[in-house]
Amino acid sequence: MTNRALYALILAGGSGTRLWPYSRRRHPKQLLPLLGDRSLLQATVDRLEPMVRPDHVLVLTSTDYVDAVRAQLPRVPAQQVVAEPEALGTAAAVGLGVALVAARDPGAVMAVLPADHVITPPAAFLGNLVQAAELAADGWLVTFGIRPTAPETGYGYISLGEALVGHAAGFRVAEFVEKPGPATAAEYVAGGKHLWNSGMFVWRADVMHAEIGRHLPALAERVDELAALAAAGPDAFAAGLGAVWAGIAVRTTIDYGVMERSDRAVCLPAEFAWSDVGSWAAVADALATVPGDPAANVLVGPHVVAVDTRGSLVLARGGRLVATVGVDDLVVVDTADALLVCRRDRAQDVRQVVAHLVDDALTEYL
Amino acid sequence: MTNRALYALILAGGSGTRLWPYSRRRHPKQLLPLLGDRSLLQATVDRLEPMVRPDHVLVLTSTDYVDAVRAQLPRVPAQQVVAEPEALGTAAAVGLGVALVAARDPGAVMAVLPADHVITPPAAFLGNLVQAAELAADGWLVTFGIRPTAPETGYGYISLGEALVGHAAGFRVAEFVEKPGPATAAEYVAGGKHLWNSGMFVWRADVMHAEIGRHLPALAERVDELAALAAAGPDAFAAGLGAVWAGIAVRTTIDYGVMERSDRAVCLPAEFAWSDVGSWAAVADALATVPGDPAANVLVGPHVVAVDTRGSLVLARGGRLVATVGVDDLVVVDTADALLVCRRDRAQDVRQVVAHLVDDALTEYL
């Protein structure tokens, strides 16, 4: 790392049910461990530890989770775990983070990282982060691009432009492409010029502040107010946040609101393996101990007995014994009060189960 | 029923683990319900209720289960639930039952019935029982034969001989055939002259007593001693059973020890549907609400959400919610401390799981 003090803005407000029954409304994905005993949020902060001091970590979450986040991150000062009064999209969240960093060090480089991604190995991530911070220090808005491994239609893609002169690793962004159709996605994978948009960014706070001013001026006024509140101290900030937040009319993503419109956007191809673990199939892929071996199982739990079982994920952190016999390509997720058994390639349809629970007023299981 | 007072000897000593994790060493199959709230043992006694008075029901079980059996059958006098000091095979068990019945009514007809079979509908069973009791009153040893629905190699078969004159429903037994190979079993099913040996019998106590004397004379001496003990009253019986039992050297089944050797053996083809529910696949077949429909699921539990699920059994009596998505021909058995997920046609391999538990000293799950 350079001598510049890096900040990190961790986005930890998600509340999805795609990993039901493990993730719940009260226990969202980012607060849960998959392997080991550290939650995805904790792993995200752990991963940054060699480069980002705990008092340079900012976490945005919802009011429902703020206490749990503070409990999970005891080394991060409590006032740096901020509850957004209402989720307004990542543009507003980034604006808030920019304000908080700018109040302390306007020229600081900050990384923006979702709290619920799986990234390995840490060293490759740190190496990329060093490169990104150098690009950011020069005024670029850096987004990490992930080399696609499949024609996913659920992700945004980044079309790579020219390589940056003097920065071997970076490319200008030719275009951000929203979720493409299957044929287009297949072309992207084959062509090698399109990367997945990971939703992870690195930029200088003052540069992003100025870009918000250029592309989202209404939001920029609120960011100025938030920066003034932050400069007035934690109590003033806590007292004033709600009123400023209520005045934000911009409800968009930072990708759409700023990155697509800016001529400073660059993409750094990631050297690390990445997953948003957005479905049980993605979890199975991300945790595979033998990458690329479709017969490999991922068995998590104190007692898992797998007899003639292939390509399956068993997540049994509740302590019960789980036995599988003669099954292939299955996802078994065992929790204290609910169990899921799902064909791996049908993981997207877990939402149908959740819809059933809503329809049948079985809200205790949501 | 005729004016003769029918007795029933219920064999309730089994301790198998083929229905693991639902059945355990401490909670064997016969003491558990599958559907509804009555255990298989209770259902066995319930089914007899129109024809057998509770004080004519005798239950043999093991010392481990005698208290549970008495608790499940409050209307059966406690001294008629007898713990065999050691399991010696069905010949000794039948000898004990014959002694107990003979001490009260030597000429009485008695049915011998395993406690862990599923039989439907009850009326068809009762109708067959009336026919069997009439044959037994005439001195025949009656065994119920089950029309085979598949070339099972795990059952004994009965080769039917001539129809009994004057008893349209009964046949002489030409031969008892031990577990045949697949080709032979297929011939049996196609030929229509072989029935499964259900292990359910009806005979007069004095006739079986005499047949034991003819074919198993060493056992017959012990049966005489047991009958004398039983005639001396419950206390004398309880005090003396152990010593007599220890003197029994015969360890065989009643099928092999007596039925195969007797010229009084007849077979009554069952009009009822029968299953020994000896595997999860058999349970799924026995409980199928739409017989013959391979897409039909059997879903047992307070909250089972089955999305695009076919041919599967979900047994979730523990109260937890179970959701399945996109799975076919699966068995899911959920209990308080252990879970099984098994392909339906691999149900026999549940024993491999049990072997793992033994090997790994996970005896709490056995």
Image (tube, coloured by chain):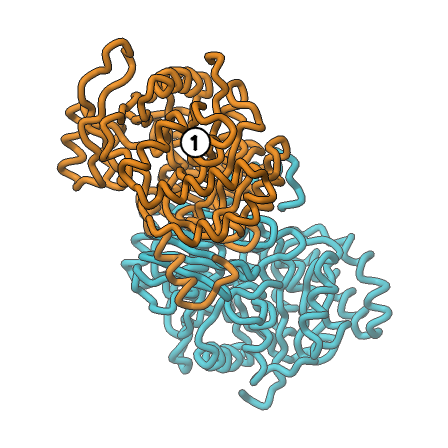
Chain colours: A cyan, B orange
What amino acid type is highlighted by mark number 1? Answer: Val
Q: Residue at x 55, y 31 (%)?
A: B36
Q: Residue at x 48, y 51 (%)?
A: B85
Task: Please tell me whether mark 1 sits on a helix, a strand or a loop.
Answer: strand
* Residue at image mark 1: B118
Position of residue B31 measured from the top left corner of the image (x, y, whole percent): 53, 41
Query: Looking at the image, how many numbered discs can be counted on the residues?
Result: 1
Badge 1 local density, few (<14 within 10 Å), some, or many (20+)? many
Residue A20 in view of the camera: yes
Q: Nearer the viewer, residue A181 or B257?
A: B257
Vertical relation: B62 (above or below) B94: below
Chain holding disc 1 = B
Residue A351 in view of the camera: no
Q: Nearer the viewer, residue A155 or B121?
A: B121
Vertical relation: A223 (above or below) B29: below
Q: Residue furthest bottom?
A: A3
Q: Nearer the viewer, residue A99 or B334?
A: B334
Residue A100 falls in image quadrant = bottom right
Position of residue A293 measured from the top left corner of the image (x, y, whole percent): 30, 64
Q: Residue at x 71, y 50 (%)?
A: A249
Position of residue A88 measured from the top left corner of the image (x, y, whole percent): 67, 53
Position of residue B125 measured from the top left corner of the image (x, y, whole percent): 42, 21
Q: Is residue A169 left or right of residue A254?
A: left
